[in-house]
Image (cartoon, helix red, strand yellow):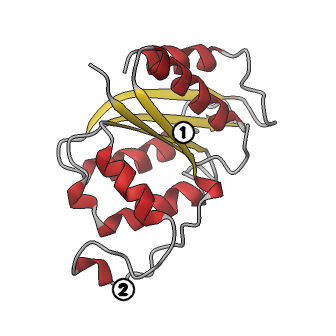
Amino acid sequence: MSKKVLILSGSPRKGGNSDLLCDEFLRGAQETGNEVEKIFLRSKKVAPCNACYFCKKDGKCAIQDDMGEILDKMQAADVIVMASPVYFYSIDAQMKAVIDRSVARWMDIPNKEFYYIMTAAEESETVMDCTLACFRGFAACLKGAKEKGVIYGKGVYEAGAIKGMPAMREAYEMGKGV
């Protein structure tokens, strides 16, 4: 059965390591007949949440930017892939803004399958613990969320350094397995 897959690429670099892993996941998911869309978050205007709670009225945010469109796509998706490079042991600002702004309709994003993609220059065992905890914390707030897979791209700094590494194949295979 074909699924609607939404990939949220938080990489600030087009063609950056986490973005390249998103492309491989996309390729695998498309090859097995899924409908896949990747949103490169840096190309969208997503302001930080200002905690005004205007959204409590009807799920519409007071801030007029691209977040409404992203939320529509999150609601319509069966699968959400969230990707971020590790920034100071956490997710980057682009991804954090999307997570925080999801407050407008977080109750309307139930029963999603989640995959997480992370990249880091460091190779330590714990370098991605907080980043993964951020992703999992978001999903834990969503009714019926199921974690389906995690991809770790360690030891990569320069854009494209991930090419030829095992994480590229893992992303492709994980995409095929959607």
User: Mark 2 vs mark 1: which is more N-terminal?
Assistant: 2
Question: x%, y% of residue 131?
Answer: 50, 46
Is residue 66 shown left or right of residue 51? right
Which residue is under mark 2?
Answer: 52
The residue under label 1 is which amino acid type? Met
Q: Residue at x 47, y 60 (%)?
A: 98
Which residue is under mark 1?
Answer: 128
Image-quadrant location for residue 81:
top left
Q: Residue at x 37, y 21 (%)?
A: 178
Q: Residues within 10 Å of mark 1 (few under 14, many from 20)?
A: many
Q: Are marks 2 and 1 in contact (CB under 8 Å)?
A: no
SS at badge 1: loop
Q: Residues within 10 Å of mark 2 (few under 14, many from 20)?
A: few
Q: Which sits in the foreground, 131 or 58? A: 58
Question: x%, y% of residue 39?
Answer: 54, 46
Q: Which sits in the foreground, 82 or 6? A: 6
Image-quadrant location for residue 43:
bottom right
Q: Which sits in the foreground, 58 or 138? A: 58
- Which residue is most to the right? 158
Is residue 74 shown left or right of residue 8? left
Quarter that holds the N terminus: top left
